[in-house]
């Protein structure tokens, strides 16, 4: 494979890295027009439009709107029918994901200041959340766990899942994961029409407060457009992995770790940073050797040749500085003493520390969420978690004494802003 080689000693390194990282999802005008039309149609015609688009795009004709929903008994049957190893793996992963996210629960709090005024914060869960799960070839039960379990831990009252079933084909692992995660209702619809149904509500599909979960370009465009009508988790870009290695990890391991994200799609990005030139070449040789074993080798090859890179750095300190500039979705710190280097790393969706911590473990069962910020947004965004399914309300209970002091402060500022009613509202209570 012809994977880009770079060195920080190159005179044009900064420019070369900028070009490598450049990813701007070009707006497809035809797609945007199509999505806008679908959203408007579902908002207007509800179930009838959803049924029509399901027939058109998923080649699935449903008798009526009620047929969009799967009975809970079918989810139970999917779980019961799993091979023992799959059932065990799903259960063990779910326990780990749940245990991790229970640590994220935020508590309400309050305190009284010196004049007896109570101030605080009340934390409450969202009432209803919509979970989009890809269907067809791209069916990911792990995404069900990662999106549904934090919502349940947060205390969300009702979780509505939508999953397309092209040609009526249902992925049993996905349905089993929905059962195990406590999903309340499942509808076999997908695409922009499913996002619209969740955002606006129909006679059959309930309106939700937030939509989470991955999807194709149509789903992403629809989520972007309905933001404000309801909340969304994020607009995810292509998968990314950045490996920092001191040169002592098995090069086969590192090559396969790069493959693990490159196999997602041709736009995925996989980068290695190492101070050891010989190790970089060993990883490249291992990648050439291992590629032929990969069922998705064409996708891997395209991703690595177009957006991958093997970069020689001066030392691990420089590697950390470059990693902060990249702010990757997944960062593997494959070095002898990862805890020593952790304080230098500020920007990453998830940090996988040590030689035995493959990124793939985080995708499925380590415990932390695999829904992570991409395209450099780890500079200001965080992984999906319980906090995304809770909201905060400020609490203010002013005492009689507090009204005297605060009334003076508020009225002075309000008069200064020219807002007479604000000022008088504060002053009325000052001597009440």
Image: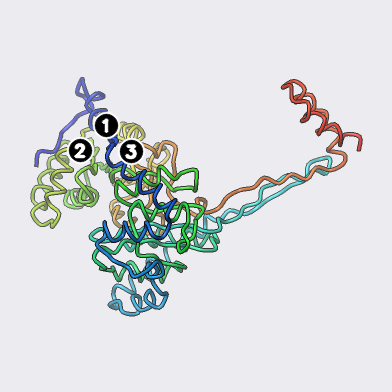
Foreground pick, 128 / 257: 128
| Callout 2 secondary element | helix
| Callout 1 secondary element | loop
Foreground pick, 251 / 186: 186
- Residue at the image point whose x is 32% and y is 50% from the top: 354
Residues at circles 3 and 2 in contact by the CB criterion of under 8 Å: no
Q: Quadrant of residue 135?
A: bottom left
Q: How far separated are the C-alphas under marks 1 and 3?
A: 9 Å
Per the image, the residue denoted by label 1 is: 22
Q: Is residue 25 left or right of residue 205?
A: left
Foreground pick, 348 / 10: 348
| Residue 316 in picture, x, y percent from top left | 30, 36
**Mark 3 neighbour density, 10 Å: few (under 14) some (14–19) many (20 or more):** many
Per the image, the residue denoted by label 2 is: 307
Quadrant occupied by the N terminus: top left
- Residue at the image point whose x is 87% and y is 41% from the top: 400
Q: Quadrant of residue 356?
A: bottom left
- Residue at the image point whose x is 38% and y is 51% from the top: 371
Residues at circles 1 and 2 in contact by the CB criterion of under 8 Å: no
Work out whether mark 3 precedes mark 2 in sequence or the reverse, and give the earlier one: 2
Task: Reply above or below: 11 against 106.
Answer: above
Q: Is residue 259 left or right of residue 51?
A: left
| Residue 352 in picture, x, y percent from top left | 34, 49
Work out whether mark 1 precedes mark 3 in sequence or the reverse, and give the earlier one: 1
Per the image, the residue denoted by label 3 is: 375
Quadrant occupied by the C terminus: top right
Q: How far separated are the C-alphas under marks 1 and 2?
A: 9 Å
- Residue at the image point whose x is 48% and y is 57% from the top: 129
**Mark 1 neighbour density, 10 Å: few (under 14) some (14–19) many (20 or more):** few
Q: How far separated are the C-alphas under marks 3 and 2?
A: 12 Å
Work out whether mark 1 precedes mark 2 in sequence or the reverse, and give the earlier one: 1
């Amino acid at each position: 494979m012809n994977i880009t080689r770079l060195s920080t000693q190159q005179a044009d390194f900064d420019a070369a890295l900028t070009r490598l990282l450049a990813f701007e999802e070009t707006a497809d005008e035809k797609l945007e027009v199509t999505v806008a039309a679908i959203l408007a149609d579902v908002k207007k015609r509800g179930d009838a439009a959803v049924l029509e688009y399901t027939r058109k795009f998923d080649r699935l004709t449903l008798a009526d709107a009620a047929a969009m929903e799967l009975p809970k008994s079918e989810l139970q049957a999917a779980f019961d029918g799993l091979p023992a190893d799959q059932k065990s793996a799903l259960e063990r992963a779910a326990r780990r994901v749940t245990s991790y996210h229970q640590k994220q629960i935020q508590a309400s709090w309050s305190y009284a200041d010196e004049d007896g005024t109570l101030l605080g914060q009340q934390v409450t869960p969202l009432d209803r959340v919509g979970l989009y799960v890809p269907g067809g070839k791209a069916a990911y039960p792990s995404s069900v766990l990662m999106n549904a379990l934090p919502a349940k831990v947060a205390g969300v009252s009702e979780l509505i899942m939508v999953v397309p079933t092209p040609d009526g084909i249902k992925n049993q692992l996905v349905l089993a994961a929905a059962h195990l995660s406590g999903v309340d209702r499942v509808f076999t619809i997908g695409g922009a029409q499913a996002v619209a149904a969740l955002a606006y509500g129909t006679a059959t599909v309930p309106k939700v407060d937030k939509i989470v979960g991955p999807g194709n370009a149509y789903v992403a465009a629809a989520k972007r457009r309905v933001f404000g009508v309801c909340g969304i988790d994020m607009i995810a870009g292509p998968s990314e992995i950045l490996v920092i290695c001191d040169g002592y990890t098995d090069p086969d391991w590192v090559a396969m770790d790069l493959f693990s994200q490159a196999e997602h799609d041709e736009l995925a990005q996989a980068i290695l940073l190492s101070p050891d030139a010989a190790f970089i070449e060993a990883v490249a040789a291992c990648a050439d050797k291992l590629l032929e074993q990969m069922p998705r080798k064409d996708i891997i090859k395209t991703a690595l040749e177009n957006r991958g890179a093997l970069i020689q750095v001066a030392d691990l300190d420089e590697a950390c500085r470059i990693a902060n500039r990249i702010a990757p979705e997944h960062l593997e710190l494959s070095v002898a003493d990862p805890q020593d280097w952790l304080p230098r790393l500020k920007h990453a969706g998830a940090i996988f520390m040590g030689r035995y911590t493959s990124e793939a473990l985080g995708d499925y069962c380590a415990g932390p969420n695999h829904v992570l910020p991409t395209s450099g947004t780890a500079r200001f965004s965080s992984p999906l978690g319980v906090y995304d399914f809770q909201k905060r309300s400020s609490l203010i209970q002013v005492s009689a004494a507090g009204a005297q002091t605060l009334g003076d402060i508020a009225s002075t500022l309000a008069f200064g802003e020219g807002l007479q009613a604000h000022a008088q509202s504060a002053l009325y209570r000052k001597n009440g």
